[in-house]
Amino acid sequence: MIIDTHIHLDDKRYDDDLGEVLDRAREGGVQRFVIPGADPSTLNRAVEIAEMHKDVYFAVGVHPYDMDNFNSLDFEKYVYHEKCVAIGECGLDYFRLEGSDEEKAEEKRKQKEVFVAQIELAKKYKKPLIVHIRDASRDSKALLIDNGASEVGGVLHCYNADDELLSLANNGFYFGIGGVLTFKNAKKLVNVLSKIPLEKLVIETDGPYLTPTPHRGQRNEPLYTTLVADKVAEILEVELNTIKETSTHNALKLFNIS
Protein backbone atom coordinates (compact mmCIF):
# COMPACT_ATOMS: atom_id res chain seq x y z
CA MET A 1 0.00 0.00 0.00
CA ILE A 2 1.21 3.49 -0.89
CA ILE A 3 -0.33 6.90 -0.32
CA ASP A 4 0.17 9.66 -2.87
CA THR A 5 0.43 12.60 -0.48
CA HIS A 6 0.49 15.27 -3.19
CA ILE A 7 -1.41 14.81 -6.44
CA HIS A 8 -3.22 17.59 -8.35
CA LEU A 9 -6.19 15.51 -9.48
CA ASP A 10 -8.13 18.75 -9.94
CA ASP A 11 -5.84 19.67 -12.85
CA LYS A 12 -7.55 19.75 -16.24
CA ARG A 13 -5.08 17.19 -17.58
CA TYR A 14 -6.97 14.52 -15.64
CA ASP A 15 -10.46 15.56 -16.70
CA ASP A 16 -10.86 13.08 -19.53
CA ASP A 17 -9.71 9.92 -17.75
CA LEU A 18 -9.67 10.55 -14.01
CA GLY A 19 -11.47 7.29 -13.22
CA GLU A 20 -8.94 5.30 -15.23
CA VAL A 21 -6.04 7.11 -13.57
CA LEU A 22 -7.37 6.25 -10.12
CA ASP A 23 -8.14 2.65 -11.07
CA ARG A 24 -4.62 2.12 -12.43
CA ALA A 25 -3.20 3.47 -9.20
CA ARG A 26 -5.42 1.33 -7.00
CA GLU A 27 -4.53 -1.78 -8.98
CA GLY A 28 -0.88 -0.90 -8.42
CA GLY A 29 -1.32 -0.61 -4.67
CA VAL A 30 -1.94 3.12 -4.22
CA GLN A 31 -4.81 3.36 -1.79
CA ARG A 32 -5.09 7.00 -0.70
CA PHE A 33 -4.73 10.29 -2.56
CA VAL A 34 -4.34 13.84 -1.22
CA ILE A 35 -5.11 16.82 -3.46
CA PRO A 36 -3.26 19.93 -2.27
CA GLY A 37 -4.94 23.31 -2.42
CA ALA A 38 -2.90 25.52 -4.75
CA ASP A 39 -5.15 27.58 -7.01
CA PRO A 40 -8.46 28.62 -5.39
CA SER A 41 -10.13 28.46 -8.80
CA THR A 42 -9.83 24.66 -8.84
CA LEU A 43 -10.67 24.02 -5.20
CA ASN A 44 -14.32 23.23 -5.83
CA ARG A 45 -13.21 20.59 -8.31
CA ALA A 46 -10.93 19.07 -5.67
CA VAL A 47 -13.83 18.88 -3.22
CA GLU A 48 -16.04 17.32 -5.88
CA ILE A 49 -13.46 14.61 -6.58
CA ALA A 50 -12.99 13.91 -2.86
CA GLU A 51 -16.74 13.54 -2.42
CA MET A 52 -16.95 11.12 -5.35
CA HIS A 53 -14.12 8.86 -4.17
CA LYS A 54 -13.83 7.62 -0.58
CA ASP A 55 -10.03 7.25 -0.87
CA VAL A 56 -9.42 10.85 -2.04
CA TYR A 57 -8.82 13.76 0.35
CA PHE A 58 -8.02 17.42 -0.18
CA ALA A 59 -6.31 20.40 1.43
CA VAL A 60 -7.24 24.07 1.31
CA GLY A 61 -4.57 26.66 0.65
CA VAL A 62 -2.88 29.04 -1.75
CA HIS A 63 0.39 28.45 -3.59
CA PRO A 64 2.78 31.42 -3.49
CA TYR A 65 2.27 31.96 -7.24
CA ASP A 66 -1.44 32.47 -6.57
CA MET A 67 -1.06 34.59 -3.44
CA ASP A 68 -3.05 37.49 -4.91
CA ASN A 69 -6.13 35.27 -4.60
CA PHE A 70 -5.57 34.53 -0.92
CA ASN A 71 -8.02 37.09 0.46
CA SER A 72 -10.77 35.82 -1.84
CA LEU A 73 -10.60 32.29 -0.43
CA ASP A 74 -13.15 31.45 2.26
CA PHE A 75 -11.20 28.88 4.28
CA GLU A 76 -14.11 28.09 6.60
CA LYS A 77 -16.18 26.98 3.60
CA TYR A 78 -13.74 24.10 3.12
CA VAL A 79 -11.76 23.44 6.28
CA TYR A 80 -14.67 21.84 8.16
CA HIS A 81 -15.36 19.39 5.35
CA GLU A 82 -14.80 15.82 6.50
CA LYS A 83 -12.35 15.19 3.66
CA CYS A 84 -10.19 18.28 4.31
CA VAL A 85 -6.94 17.07 5.88
CA ALA A 86 -4.48 19.97 5.67
CA ILE A 87 -3.75 23.65 5.00
CA GLY A 88 -1.70 24.32 1.88
CA GLU A 89 0.16 24.04 -0.29
CA CYS A 90 1.58 27.27 0.98
CA GLY A 91 5.09 28.58 1.41
CA LEU A 92 7.75 30.61 -0.36
CA ASP A 93 9.00 30.43 -3.93
CA TYR A 94 11.73 32.85 -4.98
CA PHE A 95 12.55 31.07 -8.26
CA ARG A 96 10.65 33.46 -10.53
CA LEU A 97 11.31 36.77 -8.83
CA GLU A 98 11.52 39.55 -11.40
CA GLY A 99 12.05 43.29 -11.59
CA SER A 100 14.19 45.66 -9.55
CA ASP A 101 15.64 44.84 -6.15
CA GLU A 102 12.81 46.83 -4.59
CA GLU A 103 10.19 44.91 -6.54
CA LYS A 104 11.75 41.58 -5.61
CA ALA A 105 11.83 42.61 -1.96
CA GLU A 106 8.15 43.55 -2.10
CA GLU A 107 7.28 40.21 -3.73
CA LYS A 108 9.10 38.38 -0.94
CA ARG A 109 7.30 40.45 1.69
CA LYS A 110 3.91 39.57 0.22
CA GLN A 111 4.75 35.88 -0.02
CA LYS A 112 5.86 35.84 3.61
CA GLU A 113 2.68 37.61 4.70
CA VAL A 114 0.42 35.08 2.97
CA PHE A 115 2.53 32.16 4.21
CA VAL A 116 2.35 33.31 7.83
CA ALA A 117 -1.41 33.85 7.50
CA GLN A 118 -1.79 30.22 6.43
CA ILE A 119 0.42 29.00 9.26
CA GLU A 120 -1.91 30.81 11.62
CA LEU A 121 -4.94 29.22 9.95
CA ALA A 122 -3.39 25.78 10.32
CA LYS A 123 -2.94 26.41 14.04
CA LYS A 124 -6.47 27.79 14.35
CA TYR A 125 -8.07 24.79 12.64
CA LYS A 126 -5.54 22.25 13.95
CA LYS A 127 -4.57 21.01 10.51
CA PRO A 128 -1.06 20.08 9.33
CA LEU A 129 0.64 22.22 6.69
CA ILE A 130 1.60 21.26 3.16
CA VAL A 131 4.63 23.46 2.55
CA HIS A 132 6.09 24.50 -0.79
CA ILE A 133 9.70 25.76 -0.69
CA ARG A 134 11.77 26.74 -3.71
CA ASP A 135 14.96 28.80 -3.46
CA ALA A 136 13.77 30.04 -0.07
CA SER A 137 14.91 27.51 2.54
CA ARG A 138 16.27 29.90 5.14
CA ASP A 139 13.29 32.26 5.14
CA SER A 140 10.81 29.38 5.08
CA LYS A 141 12.43 27.62 8.02
CA ALA A 142 12.57 30.83 10.03
CA LEU A 143 8.88 31.58 9.45
CA LEU A 144 7.84 28.05 10.37
CA ILE A 145 9.80 28.10 13.60
CA ASP A 146 9.11 31.71 14.59
CA ASN A 147 5.36 31.33 14.02
CA GLY A 148 4.94 28.11 15.98
CA ALA A 149 4.20 25.79 13.07
CA SER A 150 5.43 22.89 15.20
CA GLU A 151 2.01 23.01 16.91
CA VAL A 152 0.55 21.31 13.85
CA GLY A 153 3.55 20.07 11.85
CA GLY A 154 3.18 19.16 8.23
CA VAL A 155 5.08 18.04 5.17
CA LEU A 156 7.81 19.71 3.13
CA HIS A 157 6.35 18.91 -0.26
CA CYS A 158 8.88 18.02 -2.97
CA TYR A 159 11.70 18.27 -0.43
CA ASN A 160 14.52 20.22 -2.06
CA ALA A 161 17.43 18.33 -0.43
CA ASP A 162 18.61 21.35 1.54
CA ASP A 163 20.43 20.15 4.68
CA GLU A 164 19.22 23.26 6.47
CA LEU A 165 15.66 21.95 6.46
CA LEU A 166 16.44 18.54 7.94
CA SER A 167 16.15 19.79 11.51
CA LEU A 168 12.46 20.48 10.88
CA ALA A 169 11.97 16.77 11.49
CA ASN A 170 12.24 17.77 15.15
CA ASN A 171 9.42 20.30 14.65
CA GLY A 172 6.80 17.83 13.47
CA PHE A 173 7.58 17.96 9.76
CA TYR A 174 7.74 15.15 7.24
CA PHE A 175 9.59 15.12 3.93
CA GLY A 176 7.77 14.46 0.65
CA ILE A 177 9.82 12.50 -1.86
CA GLY A 178 8.70 12.27 -5.47
CA GLY A 179 9.83 11.63 -9.01
CA VAL A 180 12.78 14.02 -8.80
CA LEU A 181 14.62 11.26 -6.93
CA THR A 182 14.75 9.25 -10.17
CA PHE A 183 16.27 12.07 -12.25
CA LYS A 184 19.89 11.85 -13.39
CA ASN A 185 20.62 15.28 -11.89
CA ALA A 186 19.18 14.43 -8.47
CA LYS A 187 22.55 13.67 -6.88
CA LYS A 188 21.97 16.08 -3.99
CA LEU A 189 18.64 14.50 -3.09
CA VAL A 190 20.10 11.00 -3.47
CA ASN A 191 22.94 11.92 -1.11
CA VAL A 192 20.72 13.50 1.52
CA LEU A 193 17.98 10.86 1.48
CA SER A 194 19.66 8.72 4.14
CA LYS A 195 19.65 11.71 6.51
CA ILE A 196 15.87 11.80 6.58
CA PRO A 197 14.49 9.74 9.48
CA LEU A 198 12.50 6.91 7.93
CA GLU A 199 9.61 7.72 10.25
CA LYS A 200 9.46 11.19 8.63
CA LEU A 201 9.36 10.15 4.98
CA VAL A 202 6.25 10.24 2.76
CA ILE A 203 5.84 9.61 -0.96
CA GLU A 204 4.21 11.84 -3.54
CA THR A 205 3.97 12.44 -7.27
CA ASP A 206 3.08 16.15 -7.61
CA GLY A 207 1.26 14.94 -10.71
CA PRO A 208 0.77 15.98 -13.41
CA TYR A 209 4.26 17.43 -12.90
CA LEU A 210 7.72 15.92 -12.19
CA THR A 211 7.09 12.57 -13.84
CA PRO A 212 9.69 10.00 -12.78
CA THR A 213 12.04 8.10 -15.04
CA PRO A 214 11.31 6.23 -17.33
CA HIS A 215 8.16 8.25 -18.11
CA ARG A 216 9.66 11.76 -18.20
CA GLY A 217 7.93 13.98 -20.72
CA GLN A 218 4.57 12.33 -20.05
CA ARG A 219 1.82 13.30 -17.63
CA ASN A 220 2.60 12.12 -14.12
CA GLU A 221 -0.01 10.05 -12.28
CA PRO A 222 -0.34 8.42 -8.85
CA LEU A 223 0.57 4.93 -10.07
CA TYR A 224 4.12 6.23 -10.43
CA THR A 225 4.52 6.50 -6.66
CA THR A 226 5.52 2.85 -7.02
CA LEU A 227 8.57 3.95 -9.04
CA VAL A 228 9.49 6.43 -6.31
CA ALA A 229 9.17 3.78 -3.62
CA ASP A 230 11.36 1.44 -5.67
CA LYS A 231 14.05 4.11 -5.95
CA VAL A 232 13.93 4.96 -2.24
CA ALA A 233 14.33 1.30 -1.34
CA GLU A 234 17.21 0.92 -3.79
CA ILE A 235 19.13 3.95 -2.50
CA LEU A 236 18.58 3.19 1.19
CA GLU A 237 19.13 -0.54 0.66
CA VAL A 238 15.91 -1.25 2.53
CA GLU A 239 13.20 -3.78 1.69
CA LEU A 240 10.57 -2.28 -0.62
CA ASN A 241 7.74 -3.39 1.66
CA THR A 242 9.40 -1.53 4.53
CA ILE A 243 9.38 1.68 2.51
CA LYS A 244 5.75 1.18 1.48
CA GLU A 245 4.54 0.29 4.97
CA THR A 246 6.51 2.99 6.77
CA SER A 247 5.66 5.81 4.37
CA THR A 248 1.99 4.79 4.46
CA HIS A 249 1.96 4.75 8.26
CA ASN A 250 3.61 8.18 8.26
CA ALA A 251 1.06 9.64 5.85
CA LEU A 252 -1.92 8.26 7.77
CA LYS A 253 -0.50 9.76 10.96
CA LEU A 254 0.36 13.10 9.35
CA PHE A 255 -3.09 13.64 7.84
CA ASN A 256 -5.04 11.84 10.58
CA ILE A 257 -6.79 9.51 8.13
CA SER A 258 -7.47 5.78 8.25
Image (cartoon, rainbow, N blue to C red):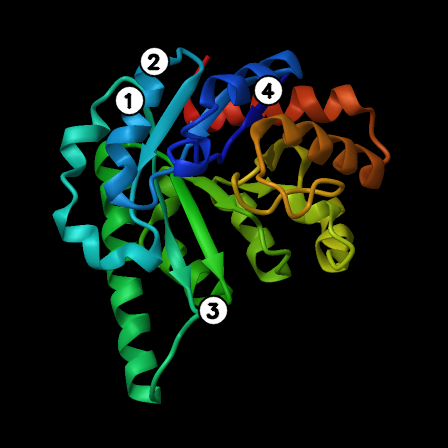
- Give the CA separation, mark 3 to mark 4: 32 Å
Of the image marks 4 and 1, the number of the one nearer the N terminus: 4
- The CA distance from mark 2 to mark 4 is 16 Å
Whether residue 83 sits left or right of residue 224 in the image: it is: left
Circle 4 sits on which residue?
Answer: 25
* Picture coordinates of residue 251, whole percent (x, y): 52, 26
Is residue 79 rendered to the left or right of residue 211?
left
Q: Which residue is mark 1?
A: 48
The three-letter amino acid code for the residue at tag 3 is: Phe
- 228 w.r.t. 84: above or below: below
Q: Secondary structure at mark 1?
A: helix
Quadrant assignment, res 221 = top right
Amino acid on which disc 2 is placed:
Met
- The answer for how far apart the CA atoms under marks 3 and 2 are is 36 Å
Say whether residue 33 is left or right of residue 40.
right
For the residues bearing labels 1 and 3, Cβ distance under 8 angstroms: no
Three-letter code for the amino acid on which mark 4 is drawn: Ala
Residue annotated with mark 2: 52
Relative placement, left or right, of 153 versus 221 is left
Along the line of sight, the residue nearer the viewer: 103 or 216: 216
Q: Residues within 10 Å of mark 2 (few under 14, many from 20)?
A: few
- Contact flag, marks 2 and 1 (Cβ < 8 Å): yes
- Identified at 13% across, 48% down, the residue is 72
Mark 3 and mark 2 lie on one chain; the one further toward the N terminus is: 2
Residue ID at (60%, 52%): 166
Q: Amino acid at mark 1?
A: Glu
Q: Residue at x 24, y 62 (%)?
A: 113
Residue 95 bears which disc, if any?
3
